[in-house]
Image (spheres, helix red, strand yellow):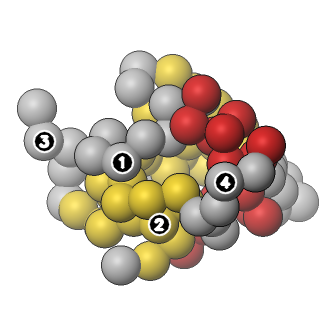
Amino acid sequence: MTTLDQLQPGQFGQIVRIDGFDGIASRLREMGFVPGQPVQFLRTAPLGDPMKCSVQGSRIAVRNGEARRVYIEPMAAPIS
């Protein structure tokens, strides 16, 4: 298990858990970062933060600090 910020562009992972119960964790869950969902790391901004991800059909930018709170299991491709 690793965190979302450790993926390389183009890689997929399955969300295992979101660390914490504060407002940031709630916002991540509201954006679709929920356990069991596949997520793909698309790319980073030119200075490396934020990073752009695809989750539940939406493209979402998250800060690296937020991505470090999303624990994932890397996978080869999303399970359809």
Query: Of the residues tagged 3 and 2, which is closer to the observer?
Result: 2
**From the viewer's perspective, is 9 left or right of 73?**
right
Query: Percent x, y for residue 39?
Result: 40, 45
Residue behind mark 2: 71
User: Which residue is depicted at the point 66% across and 54% down?
Assistant: 21
- Mark 4 residue crowding within 10 angstroms, few (<14) / some (14–19) / many (20+): few
First in residue order: circle 4 vs circle 3: 4
* Nearer the observer, 70 or 51: 70
The CA span between labels 3 and 1 is: 14 Å
Quarter of the figure with residue 53 = top right
Which quarter shows the N terminus?
Answer: bottom left
Determine the secondary structure under disc 1: loop
First in residue order: circle 2 vs circle 1: 1
Whether the residues at callouts 4 and 1 have beta carbons within 8 Å, the answer is no
- Mark 1 residue crowding within 10 angstroms, few (<14) / some (14–19) / many (20+): some
First in residue order: circle 3 vs circle 2: 2
Q: Which mark identifies residue 61? A: none
Q: Which mark identifies residue 21? A: 4
Query: Percent x, y for residue 65?
Result: 78, 64
Q: Which mark identifies residue 79? A: 3
Query: Percent x, y for residue 79?
Result: 13, 41
Determine the secondary structure under disc 3: loop
- Mark 2 residue crowding within 10 angstroms, few (<14) / some (14–19) / many (20+): many
**From the viewer's perspective, is 38 left or right of 42?**
left
Depicted 53 relative to depicted 11: above or below: above
Farthest top residue in view: 57
Residue behind mark 1: 35
Kind of residue at disc 1: Pro
Quarter of the figure with residue 62 = top right
